[in-house]
Amino acid sequence: MKKVFHLNTCDTCRKILAQFDLTDWELREIKKEPVTEEELAEMYKRTQSYEALFSKKSTQIKLRGLDVKSLKEKDFKNLLLDHYTFLKRPVFVTDKEIFVGNDKNNIENLKKFFGAE
């Protein structure tokens, strides 16, 4: 399995995806085709945390009046399934690894994975 979950409208996602050869990867635009419960379970298997997959920058947090500090794992899971903007992105998933988000460390790990360094 080689999948990338991303948003076409996200400049950061586009910039990151452009750095790598994704010819044999399945690109999933999460606004058009949201993450399924099975896919989220696969991501969870690799991270052992729904919170690690959750974007604390989602505009939905403020709109819904959520207190992120009070959320439990079950809450993170339900929110991730409820709205695409809650997924930290991009998410690269392989049979053995997962790369979540756009922080510097994650991008460095992606570059190593792709042999781009």
Image (cartoon, rainbow, N blue to C red):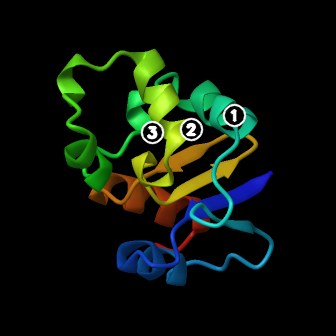
Identify which residue, 66 or 16, lies in the foreground: 66
Residue that badge 3 annotates = 53
Quadrant position of residue 31:
bottom right
Identify which residue, 49 or 82, lies in the foreground: 82
What SS does tag 2 mark? helix
Asked if residue 91 shows in the view, the reply is yes
Residue that badge 2 annotates = 81
Q: Which badge, 1 or 2, is on the more N-terminal residue?
A: 1
Mark pair 2, 3: CA separation: 11 Å
At which x and y percent is residue 113?
57, 59
Asked if residue 58 shows in the view, the reply is no
Q: What's under tag 1, amino acid-wise?
A: Glu
Identify which residue, 57 or 49, lies in the foreground: 57
What SS does tag 1 mark? helix
Q: Which badge, 3 or 1, is on the more N-terminal residue?
A: 1
What SS does tag 3 mark? helix
Mark pair 1, 2: CA separation: 7 Å
Instruction: Say if mark 2 contacts mark 3, CB within 8 Å.
Output: no
At which x and y percent is residue 4?
63, 61
Q: What's under tag 3, amino acid-wise?
A: Leu
Which residue does the image show at 41% across and 46% down from the upper left?
Answer: 86
Q: What's under tag 2, amino acid-wise?
A: Leu
Quadrant position of residue 29:
bottom right
Residue that badge 1 annotates = 37
Asked if residue 6 is positioned above or below residue 15 in the image, the reply reads above
Q: In this view, does 100 lie to the left or right of 67?
A: right
